[in-house]
Image (tube, rainbow, N blue to C red):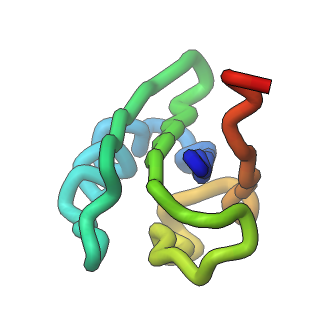
Amino acid sequence: MTVALMWEARAAAGRGEELLAWVRGRGLAPEPVRRETFRAPQDRVLVITWWDAPYDAELPELPEPAAPLVTRPVHRWRFESADGE
């Protein structure tokens, strides 16, 4: 089964590049099958990781950045693949 974890944060004003660099500097162990990083207006950063694991598996996730770097707590979502149903 494929599980996708989504991690999204909004940087404090003017700190979008710093948040992006912070995310890029965070590794996960073990490594996911796939990892992509996106950015959007309002200094938002999104990371999606794909895992070959059951939906409820214990998987490593990116941590919360230091409070001064973000405007709110990180949003997290977990999805399972619906392909092949």
Depth check, front residue: 28 or 72: 28
Q: 42 left or right of 45?
A: right
Q: 35 left or right of 25?
A: right
Residue drawn 42% across the image and 27% down it = 38
Residue closest to the far top:
41
Q: Is residue 84 above or below residue 7?
A: above
Q: 77 left or right of 52?
A: right
Depth check, front residue: 23 or 57: 57
Q: Is residue 24 above or below residue 40?
A: below
Residue drawn 23% across the image and 51% down it = 24
Please identify the quarter of the rendering in which residue 23 is found: bottom left
Depth check, front residue: 5 or 18: 5
Residue 17 appears at what percent x and percent y?
Answer: 30, 38
Q: 74 left or right of 41?
A: right
Residue closest to the far bottom:
58
Residue drawn 52% across the image and 38% down it = 46
Number of numbered discs visible in the structure rendering: 0
Residue closest to the far right:
85
Please identify the quarter of the rendering in which residue 39 is found: top left
Quarter of the figure with the C terminus: top right
Residue 44 appears at what percent x and percent y?
Answer: 56, 34
Residue 37 appears at what percent x and percent y?
Answer: 37, 35
Residue 33 appears at what percent x and percent y?
Answer: 31, 49
Depth check, front residue: 60 or 39: 60
Q: Is residue 18 above or below residue 46?
A: below
